[in-house]
Image (spheres, rainbow, N blue to C red):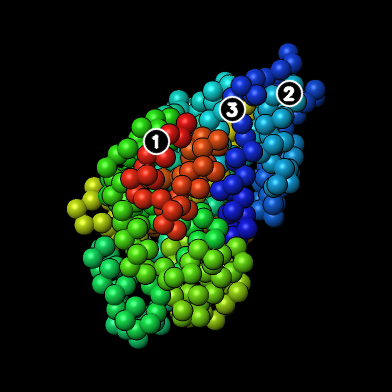
Amino acid sequence: METYSRRWFLGAGTTALVSAAGLTACGSGGSGGSDGTLTAFVYGDDAAKVQAKAVSRFNSSAAARETKGSLKLEKVPGAEYPAKLRTAMGSPNAPDVFFNWGGGSIKAYREAGQILDLTGTIAGDPVLKDGFLPSVLDAGALGGRKYGIPMRGMQPVVLFYNKTLFAEHGLKPPATWDQLLDNNARLKKAGITPFALGGADIWPELMWLEYLVDRIGGPEVFDRVKNGDPAGWGDPAVLKAARTVRELVDDGAFGKGFSSVAYTNGGAPAALAKGKAAMHLMGSWEYSTQLGKFPDFARKHLGWCAFPEFDGGAGDIRNVVGNPTNYWSVNTRTRNKDAALAFLRTCASDTYARELIANGDVPATAGADKLLDASPSPDFARFQYRMVREAPAFTLSWDQAVDPDAATPMLTEVNKLFVGKSSPERFVAALKELK
């Protein structure tokens, strides 16, 4: 399962990318080795073993022979990945296929004409069109155009709760905002902090705004920003979400010391597991974090549900935010597009899905539900899969979806809002200035 340390890199690492001006391709040669071997860059963590097996399998397949192509996988250490990819993409030795996060992480490559538009290819290929959950395919897009194929597990943000505390106090998982506020009041009366929050890391705070903007205004609000319109931050839903956050903070929903609690050192997960907090809004990797740190709690007392609907809001309670997955994209300069696309098709296979599941991931492939009995955590895996499969929209985490240059300033404004150094109105005004 995904760990919190890697999640932090996903949120912050893309800021190492710079504008398209520095990505102009140089050299006259196309991508690919001199012998016709294509290169695939992948984020070099433990999960890369799944991609290594896929490359080996493809190289011995009929598809490789038919397209007269083969691939060589280059594992790039995680901390070096964004910078090394950027450097390589501006050289004659650019990778033919490369791992990315979609959204803002590929914007510069699109503007430099270095990433293949797969929209028509996907629409005309049943394997790619029908092989993946639609919300995940759409989540990696820019301006309605698709540039990537899902290649790792899904990571939706989930509302986790302590089942034992809920039972002791006669509470039910909140399906509406009024129910959430009622639960908060009853928990505080009992001396329990309603929500754990790793405010010292900032990105856990972002999850609250992501869901609130979706539930209040629908996914279209942030889509405007993602597609390059900073004026979208001025939508009334953003201001309403910011005011709602301040109401939660002022009401003590996160306790008094949340800004000094971190997720990355285990503080927030421990608060949930030890009964100091009743709920925790976090990415799906929270399950594996709890299983590793507090296995008895994870197996017996950890519950999960969707983020509640907001009364009068336009967003569907089935909508999801988070990290839809990671994507394979193709360099426009590849010497063998047919081989590159044939390799991408392998990501839709049951064989590939089984290997992801064995690694603790939940695949984004259509029909993967029938394979989830083999998951190390089948009940939670089924919940994740069903959640994403039924989602009308899956919004990519804002810090990954916006232009990389805007991610850090945005997170700074989020933190100022939570700790009371900015008002909701100033928060909106500051976001509208981001480019």
Q: Nearer the viewer, residue 413 or 400?
A: 413
Q: What amino acid is labelled 1 in the image? A: Lys
Count residues near mark 1 (Cα–Cα under 10 Å), then give few for <14, some for 14-19, many for 20+: some
Q: Is residue 138 above or below residue 264?
A: above
Residue 423 place in picture, x, y as percent: 36, 50
Report the residue at 69% width, 47% height from top: 78
Residue identifier under label 2: 91
Residue 299 place in picture, x, y as percent: 51, 77
Count residues near mark 2 (Cα–Cα under 10 Å), then give few for <14, some for 14-19, many for 20+: some
Q: Nearer the viewer, residue 236 or 156?
A: 236
Q: Residue furthest top?
A: 28
Q: Residue furthest front?
A: 421
Q: In terms of sequence position, does the residue under pointer 3 or pointer 1 come before the other?
A: 3
Label for residue 432? Answer: 1
Of discs 3 and 1, which sits in the foreground? 1
Q: What amino acid is labelled 2 in the image? A: Ser
**Tag 2, which secondary structure?**
loop
Report the residue at 50% width, 48% height from top: 412
Residue identifier under label 3: 19
Q: CA distance from mark 1 to mark 2?
A: 35 Å
User: Residue 24, located in which quarter of the rendered image?
Assistant: top right
